[in-house]
Amino acid sequence: MTEPHMGSPALIRPVAGDRLRLFALKGTEELGQAISRRLDWPLARHEERDFEDGEHKIRPLDAVCGADVYVAHSLHGGPGQSANDKLCRLLFFIGALKDAGAARVTAVVPYLCYARKDRRTKPNDPVTTRYVAALFESVGADAIVALEVHNEAAFENAFRCRAVALTAAPLLIEAIKAVVEDAPLCIISPDLGGGKRADLLREALEASTGRQVGKAFAEKRRSADVVSGDLFVGDVAGAACIIVDDLVSTGGTLVRAARAARDRGARRIIACVTHGLFMPGAEKALADPAIERIIATDTVPPFRLAAGACPR
């Protein structure tokens, strides 16, 4: 049996009647510590224990009876734990918290696994987002908070408990402003489905900079894992273009949009995503000279990329 993983040993201080608890599960410690510092909430203690047969147990070590509990855990796969492993541990922990008398449990999930499987694209396809929602509800989750989900409406409709979809736009805008110059700005959505996300970022960027920001769309069609589409709408000539998407996987979608914009006279291309999955093959695609820089948040650590493997 391996050594148990513990959260911070700091004692819970009386906050709002000593009714708040913040936990960060294994693999999300840095995020939990950042939240703790930002909100001045100490991390509560918990135990995670792995057994030789692959099973595990997880339990709170601080009292949670009657408490308003928040559990931070980003559900991306990684070294030692798959997305399924992380999801299972989070569900078990929520169940343990409710059994221990927690009044309310909120899952804070920066990256939500299976969020892209929100509809059927083939006969008998699973709608996995809805099944994940049912799992959270079955263990007693009262709310779930996720960052930049693939489809906000589908995410909110999948859950019967409260579902909060946060936008990464405020974070991304500051990073964009640090690298763009005085060239005209244009936001590009690499597919029509990301139009709302692009609009939100464009409006926020206009409000923050006081400058008019253009908009463009690239077409993307997917069939049998082959991506195609030649339509491009919008004037990008001479502009510093920001390609915005919820995530980057292999990078093919970003590269297609970047090349299309370059062919139409774009001056600079910056890719801006919330979740950097960087799956195998991404290093080659994202080394493409069409993309000058990639901006991503830390919801998924870039552990799959070698240092200097692609522009940052």
Image (cartoon, rainbow, N blue to C red):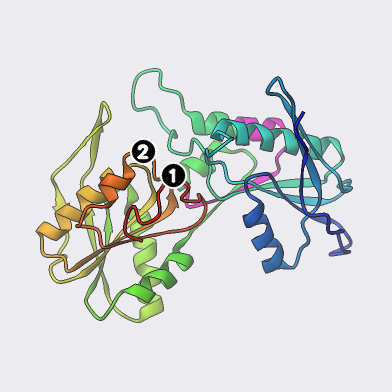
Q: Are marks 1 and 2 in contact (CB under 8 Å)?
A: yes
At 32% from the left and 47% from the top, the residue drawn is 283
Visible in this render: residue 170?
yes
Give the magenta part as a residue range: 134-151
Residue highlighted by disc 2: 280
Q: Which mark is residue 304?
A: 1
Q: In terms of depth relative to the viewer, which is nearer, 285 or 172?
A: 285
Distance from Cα at disc 1 to Cα at disc 2: 8 Å
Q: Identify which amino acid the numbered label 2 is placed on.
A: Pro
- Badge 1: few (under 14), some or many (20 or more) residues near its Cα, within 10 Å? some
In the picture, the quarter occupied by the N terminus is top right
Is 176 left, or right, of 10 in this rendering? Answer: left
At 89% from the left and 46% from the top, the residue drawn is 65
Question: How far from the left and from the top, in percent, is residue 73?
Answer: 63, 46
In the picture, the quarter occupied by the C terminus is bottom left
Question: How far from the left and from the top, in percent, is residue 84?
Answer: 57, 31
Q: Secondary structure at mark 2?
A: loop
Q: In terms of depth relative to the viewer, which is nearer, 167 or 182?
A: 182
Question: How far from the left and from the top, in percent, is residue 107?
Answer: 66, 46
At 55% from the left and 33% from the top, the residue drawn is 82
**Is residue 282 located in the magenta-colored stretch of the structure?**
no
Q: Secondary structure at mark 1?
A: loop
At 89% from the left and 47% from the top, the residue drawn is 63
**Is residue 138 located in the magenta-colored stretch of the structure?**
yes
N-terminal of the pair, mark 1 or mark 2, is 2
